[in-house]
Image (cartoon, rainbow, N blue to C red):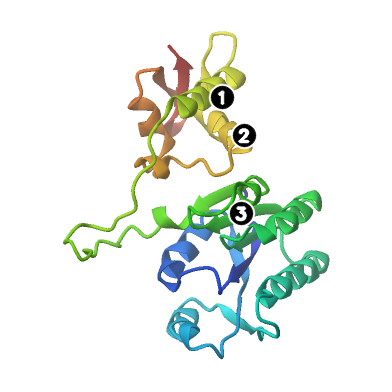
Amino acid sequence: MIKDTKLAVLIDGDNIPAKYVKEMMEEITKYGTPTIKRIYGDWTRPDLTKWKKILLENAINPIQQYSYTTGKNATDSAMIIDAMDILYSEKVNGFCLVSSDSDFTKLATRLREAGMVVYGIGEKKTPDPFIVACDKFIYLEILNTDNTKKDAKGESNKPSLDKITPKIIRLLKNSVSDAADEDGWAFLGDVGSLILKKQPNFDSRNFGFEKLTPMFKSLKHFEIEQRDQNNKKFKLVYVRNK
């Protein structure tokens, strides 16, 4: 991740709930500076009026796209055309495509072929082809951490966490082995990068852990070692399969 990466943030307004925008924009700043922020939709539709205040608060530029034909998604086409124009303008180093729609799979692939880093953001219903076409994919549900309202039964509607299945354990163990030195130890930062290359939608927050380190510490399959650095306050974390 390059801190001074300039990102173009393109949002499918027909496909993304407005309630996630604040947390989403905060998440994006972890990966770079959003220098272009656009959202696409038919703003004449009554159901999109709730976006107005949110767009002003986050300095997102709404792009009007009329729905010319029933059943055809004109928003997708406008967003794809803009993305290619931005790519050739050479004003950014990467893209953040915000949608749960698999129609953007080919766009993500094309942008990466051009050397752009591509972050995808969408709901958990997002099809796998779009997810794997991105360098990293983030689920919106894990960002809306303040959503603690009760449903009709009085139960919290916080998003349910994913289970750490045997398949996930294999992913972690294999990634540690692939990144390990001759003694079996692997720098956790390298392990995390390798996991993302194998599975772009992997995120420790999906399993209830803010960071990768506590997730590994919670699992009996691994041992953790913290190593001092010369003249530096923080320690490097290494992991090894048991």
Q: CA distance from mark 3 to mark 2?
A: 15 Å
* Sequence-earlier tag: 3 or 2: 3
Q: Determine which of the numbered discs, if any, sits on residue 230 in the image.
A: none
Seen in the picture, residue 145 relative to 197 is either above or below; the reply is below
Q: Is residue 229 visible?
A: no
Q: Residues within 10 Å of mark 1 (few under 14, many from 20)?
A: many
Q: Which residue is mark 1?
A: 175
Residue plotted at (47% across, 16% down): 240
Q: Is residue 241 visible?
A: yes
Q: Which residue is mark 2?
A: 198
Q: Residues within 10 Å of mark 3 (few under 14, many from 20)?
A: many
Verify CB contact (< 8 Å) between mark 1 and mark 2. Answer: yes
Left or right side of 181 for 58: left
Across and down, in percent, residue 48 comes to: 49, 83
Which of the 4 quarters of the picture holds residue 198? top right
Q: Which of the pair 88/14 is nearer the observer? A: 14
Q: Secondary structure at mark 1?
A: helix
Q: What amino acid is labelled 1 in the image? A: Ser
Seen in the picture, residue 170 relative to 204 is either above or below; the reply is above
Q: Which residue is mark 3?
A: 119
Across and down, in percent, residue 242 comes to: 43, 11
Seen in the picture, residue 22 relative to 237 is either above or below; the reply is below
Label 3 or label 2, whichever lies nearer to me, is 2
Q: Residue furthest bottom?
A: 44
Left or right side of 227 for 150: left
Left or right side of 147 for 78: right
* Sequence-earlier tag: 1 or 2: 1
Q: CA distance from mark 3 to mark 1?
A: 21 Å
